[in-house]
């Protein structure tokens, strides 16, 4: 079995299994903890509170105007590489073919040259994000292994992908194999670290937004 | 044993505990208390650091340790190490270290001295995390570890035992009656079968007696059947500040019992922000069932009376005016419109601050910080921006609706030689009741 077949075959299967079980276990972990009941008299009805939660789910996508001067640039940087990642993951023809083999659905792709531009941009933004993390006094203090490793594994997937499409760094099959293996590694790491925020972000905004709206508090 | 002696003995007991026992106590308290919601909040943090930009302590100092989520770092670490879904993996890989006694000691400054529990950070997090809720929980653990600041601990202990946070030469009940005599207003006391039970901030009793008289006067004017209760006078809850959850419960119970005894259908929280949080949002949860009466802030109650047509106000000659939104009432409590409704009814020419309403900066004294002596220098630094915002409105009159905020601003007057005098919205209402002589209180 060559490297690509291994990465696409057994390695991917194991990675997907770890990913699925890990994600489920991490979510079940909360369910095992106590859920406290609220006995205080709500200011707003449940419906109004839930609407507040829905609004917060959307509105937290960008800081309230009171905060934009201080935080707008940092958030824009975050958006930049997230959008780049989404485009590269979802609009590159070989990726679409891969998803097609997994889920049985495909969609139109962007031209390879456009994907290459987005990949380079995304990689550049990821470098900027790392630079910011190690130089910004707050980010440096907050950062731990999870932050750096999650950055590393994401960047590794992008870099090996770029190398494979540009045919640099070694035989195409080897680099492609490494690219897929790095993706497998990302799947394995996913449930253990902060990449889980992909699953948490909307429920977190919705739950906290609902609880604040229940009190009529700002969200 | 006298109260003071018991208190000293308790404090000595805390001091006698080994640092390790303190850490174990704190972490146990935290682990026991952590529910699914807090766990979820902690797990959701992506370490983006954005919450720092909401906190006045960080904005004033640019010191990263004042980043809101960092204030719960040891607890986040402990949770991940002890009870998260992958706790064994974290322990095995050594990714989450045990929290040391030294660390926890240092965190006392971060959780108490440099946090007003104002909730501004909870509005900025892109993950929607309610950071101040986590801080409140971390304070509980600090209390369990004997690491609540002495000033807050002592006041909470006193209040739990006597109903008063501080000993006073004259009991508050007598002071209350004296205030009534001084301002010529009848103080309804220890009545039964009333509609409304009134409470009073000890800050008003000690510093702003006119506000106490204003409350009695307004209620008398409205003809509401109401009473203060000798055994449930003080609105503040130092158990809440100190992080002593059980003490907070007992202090709340004192008021709940009194409200039940006088059969009140409504308990009015006076001009005190954190008392509102403690009674409106937390008392029922600590009581374990819904309260058999409603809880409203005095400005909410008055705005409602206004809308019902039961209260009419005269135009108040305040000139250009600005209003400080107390965090616990407005941002965290949702009492945003009521004070503005009252001001509008008095024709107040309101000039809002740059950050107002839900986004208002804390006065710097909330969360018990104004009571912590050693926190004063940092508090003053964090306050400077707020004072600038007040000044920038160009207003000559400065109003608020929380006596602790008022005290904090008053303190700033002497510290900074600041020329504004914080005034009470309740007093302004009492001075402008239609059909009265005005300024009588
Ligand atoms: S609650 Fe207020 S004082 Fe405390 S960390 Fe958040 S913004 Fe800062
Ligand atoms: S803003 Fe929210 S996600 Fe970002 S560091 Fe603060 S608590 Fe964590």
Image (cartoon, coloured by chain):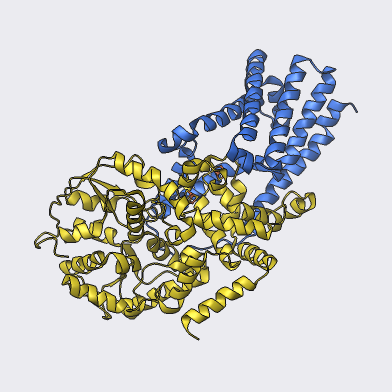
Chain colours: A blue, B yellow
Give me the residue at 65% from left, 31% from top.
Answer: A130
- What residue lies at 30% left-to-right and 74% top-to-bottom? B264
Residue sitting farthest toward the bottom: B1
Say whether residue B42 is left or right of residue B307: right
In the rendered image, residue A28, in percent from the top left (x then y), is placed at 66, 53
Residue B171 x, y percent position in the rendering: 33, 79
Q: Is residue A139 above or below residue B182?
A: above
Residue A1 higher or lower than B381, as above or below: above
Judge whether residue B125 can be spotted in this image.
no
Residue B407 lies in quadrant: bottom left
Where is residue B101 drawn, in percent x and y? Answer: 67, 60
Q: Residue furthest right?
A: A1
Give percent across and percent down for residue B293: 35, 70
Horizontally, residue B31 falls left or right of residue B320, namely right
Residue at image position (34%, 39%) is B354
Residue A73, above or below B302: above
Q: Is residue B4 left or right of residue B323?
A: right
Residue A204 in view, yes or no: yes
Task: Please give left or right for residue B102 compared with residue A42 in the image.
Answer: right
Q: Is residue A45 above or below residue B245?
A: above
Q: Quadrant of the N terminus of chain A?
A: top right
Dividing the image into four equal quarters, which quarter contains ligand 2? top right
Nearer to the camera, A152 or A56: A152
């Amino acid at each position: 079995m060559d490297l690509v077949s291994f990465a696409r075959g057994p390695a991917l299967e194991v990675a997907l299994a770890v990913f699925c079980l890990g994600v489920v276990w991490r979510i079940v972990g909360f369910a095992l903890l106590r859920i406290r009941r609220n006995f205080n008299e709500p200011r707003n009805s449940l419906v109004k509170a839930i609407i507040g939660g829905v609004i917060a789910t959307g509105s937290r996508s960008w800081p309230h105007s009171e905060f934009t001067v201080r935080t707008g640039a940092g958030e824009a940087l975050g958006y930049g590489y997230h959008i780049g990642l989404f485009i590269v993951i979802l609009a590159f023809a070989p990726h679409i073919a891969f998803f097609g083999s997994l889920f049985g659905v495909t969609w139109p792709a962007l031209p390879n040259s456009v994907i290459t531009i987005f990949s380079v941009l995304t990689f550049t933004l990821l470098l900027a994000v790392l630079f910011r993390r190690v130089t910004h006094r707050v980010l440096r203090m907050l950062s731990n292994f999870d932050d750096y490793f999650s950055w590393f594994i994401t960047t590794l997937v992008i870099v090996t992908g770029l190398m494979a499409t540009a045919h640099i760094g070694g035989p195409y099959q080897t680099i492609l194999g490494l690219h897929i293996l790095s993706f497998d590694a990302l799947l394995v790491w996913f449930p253990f670290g902060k990449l889980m925020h992909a699953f948490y972000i909307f429920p977190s905004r919705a739950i906290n937004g609902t609880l604040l709206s229940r009190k009529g508090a700002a969200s | 044993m006298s109260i003071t002696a018991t208190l000293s003995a308790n404090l000595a007991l805390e001091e006698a505990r080994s640092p390790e026992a303190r850490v174990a106590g704190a972490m146990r308290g935290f682990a026991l208390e952590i529910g699914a919601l807090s766990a979820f909040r902690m797990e959701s943090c992506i370490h983006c650091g954005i919450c720092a930009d909401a906190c006045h302590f960080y904005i004033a100092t640019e010191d990263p340790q004042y980043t809101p989520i960092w204030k719960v770092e040891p607890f986040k670490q402990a949770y991940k190490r002890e009870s998260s879904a992958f706790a064994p993996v974290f322990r095995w890989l050594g990714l989450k270290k045990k929290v040391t006694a030294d660390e926890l000691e240092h965190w006392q400054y971060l959780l108490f001295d440099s946090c007003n529990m104002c909730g501004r950070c909870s509005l900025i997090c892109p993950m929607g995390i309610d950071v101040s809720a986590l801080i409140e929980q971390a304070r509980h653990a600090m209390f369990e570890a004997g690491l609540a600041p002495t000033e807050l601990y002592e006041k909470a202990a006193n209040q739990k035992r006597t109903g008063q946070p501080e000993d006073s030469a004259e009991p508050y009940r007598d002071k209350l009656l004296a205030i009534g005599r001084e301002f010529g207003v009848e103080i309804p006391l220890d009545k039964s079968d009333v509609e409304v039970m009134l409470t009073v901030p000890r800050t008003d009793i000690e510093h702003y007696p006119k506000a106490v008289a204003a409350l009695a006067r307004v209620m008398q004017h409205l003809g509401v059947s109401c009473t203060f209760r000798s055994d449930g006078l003080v609105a503040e809850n130092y158990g809440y500040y100190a992080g002593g959850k059980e003490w907070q419960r007992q202090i709340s119970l004192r008021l709940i019992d009194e409200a039940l005894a006088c059969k009140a259908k409504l308990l009015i929280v006076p001009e005190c922000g954190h008392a509102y949080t403690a009674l409106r949002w937390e008392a029922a949860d600590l009581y374990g069932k819904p309260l058999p009466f409603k809880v409203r802030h005095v400005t909410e109650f008055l705005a409602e009376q206004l809308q019902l047509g039961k209260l009419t106000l005269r135009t108040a000659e305040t000139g250009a005016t600005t209003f400080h939104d107390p965090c616990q009432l407005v941002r965290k409590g949702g009492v945003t419109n009521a004070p503005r409704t009252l001001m509008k009814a008095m024709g107040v020419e309101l000039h809002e601050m740059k950050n107002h309403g839900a986004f208002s900066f804390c006065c710097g004294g909330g969360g018990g910080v104004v009571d912590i002596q050693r926190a004063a220098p940092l508090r003053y630094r964090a306050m400077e921006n707020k004072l600038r915002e007040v000044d920038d409105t160009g207003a000559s009159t400065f109003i608020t609706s929380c006596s602790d905020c008022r005290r904090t601003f008053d303190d700033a007057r002497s510290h900074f030689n600041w020329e504004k005098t914080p005034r009470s919205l309740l007093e302004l209402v009492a001075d402008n009741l239609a059909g009265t002589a005005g300024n009588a209180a």
